[in-house]
Image: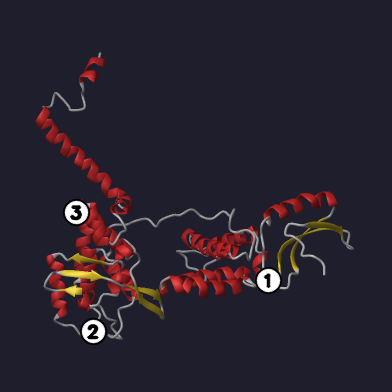
Amino acid sequence: MAGKRANGEGSVKKRADGRWEGVIVVGHKSDGRPITKSVFAKTQKELLPKLRRTIDTYRGAELTEDSSMTVFEWTEKWFAEYAVPKLRPSTVEGYRQYAKQICRFIGDKQLKSVTTADCQRIYNTLKKSGRVKCTARSGKGLSDASVRSVHLLLHEMMEHARQKKLIAVNPTVGTVVPKQNSAEMKVLNEEQLDIYLEIIRSDPFWHDFFYLELTTGLRLGELCALRWEDFDQSKGTLRVSRTLGGSGDVVSVGDPKTDAGKRAIFLPQSTATVMTERLKKKYSPWIFPSLDEPEKPVSKSSAYHRHKYFLRAAGLPDIRFHDLRHTFATHALKSGVDAKTLSGILGHTNASFTLDTYTHVTGEMQHRAAEIVGGFMEEIFGKELKPWQTDEKKEQEP
């Protein structure tokens, strides 16, 4: 029996159709037969550089028979073995939506045959016309953030495939994807905040929901998933230990976004009073139950649409629900709450992230701090002598 051909071995031949073909071994099947990769050119001179590049690309590779599975098959395997056991259900559901976009283009293609050009074509098409429901506001294309999310998922799946020796290289490497563009933060000013607080008073059910949001800055999923067991009336505290994930009919209750998301916060007295009054009318284990099904928590979509209704009714700017969280944080910082304390309230991993997020506020705070420092230093040293004016500097003055 012939010996097993080593990986990277190449052969060149002229085909019957006149083209030249270069073949290299890139792996072996379970019975020892080689798995090959072919490149073609019109002449032998054109073929040799292509063959050398292919040999370099597959150097050290040891592909298996599973390399012939389709992208769709690998996607299902990846979700079953990697995503579902390790990620939150809501995260998995979001990934599945991105995976559908990927499989729409290359689902039937063999995993080993996916190229960088294929990946780039996906991103370009999604950016231009990837939206299923086109609106005058959003247009036909997906946002930069969505295209980038598709890329990150495809990169992760292909990297796992490379590590499993199903492919030699990750084809997403070398593609051009949109930069990370965070959504513009919009904050209600004091006058607008007063108007918002006034409009929510018109709705007894939703008033408490949005009042709690504006005085704690909880994430929408955290707010919807609150249960009465989380509220300590005697201490005036609220424990955040779960979040509502998913959308539409696919809804799940799981852990908060980060470990720091599990936290207990002290409520302002006015908020504790609102919660205490609401507790007297309790009819569900959820603090904010669904209007139609009290045994279930209120949905995030219901809260989102009600928020938009209040904005329109009050003639306020069209801001996201998440901007209410930014509104709370911004006014808290401006009122003197230190970044470390605010970080704990918001469930951020550390105070530096809070400071980085709200640089527009910290800049103003630094300016005020400089004025305060300048004021009391002036009182100590007098207007004629500033502490930064050293004797050396004075000697250099003309």
Find disc 3 in the rendering and name its residue. 337
Within 10 Å of the Cα at label 1, are there few (<14), some (14-19), or many (20+) other Cα atoms? few
Quadrant of the rendered image containing residue 264: bottom left
Q: Tag 1, which secondary structure?
A: helix
The numbered mark, 2 or 3, whose residue comes first in the sequence reads 2
Left or right of 56? Residue 153 is left
Residue at 12%, 71% (x, y): give it: 273
Is label 2 in contact with label 1 (beta carbons under 8 Å)? no
* Disc 2: which residue: 284
N-term mark: 2 or 1 = 1
Q: Nearer the viewer, residue 82 or 191?
A: 82
Nearest the camera: 55 or 221? Answer: 55
Q: Which residue is mark 1?
A: 65
Q: Is residue 9 above or below residue 267?
A: above
Tag 3: amino acid: Val
**Secondary element at image label 3:** loop
Q: Is residue 292 left or right of residue 268?
A: right
Q: Is residue 242 above or below residue 361?
A: below
Q: Can residue 133 be seen?
A: no
Q: Residue at x 28, y 83 (%)?
A: 291
> Which-is-in-front pick, marks 2 and 1?
1
Q: Is residue 339 left or right of residue 104?
A: left
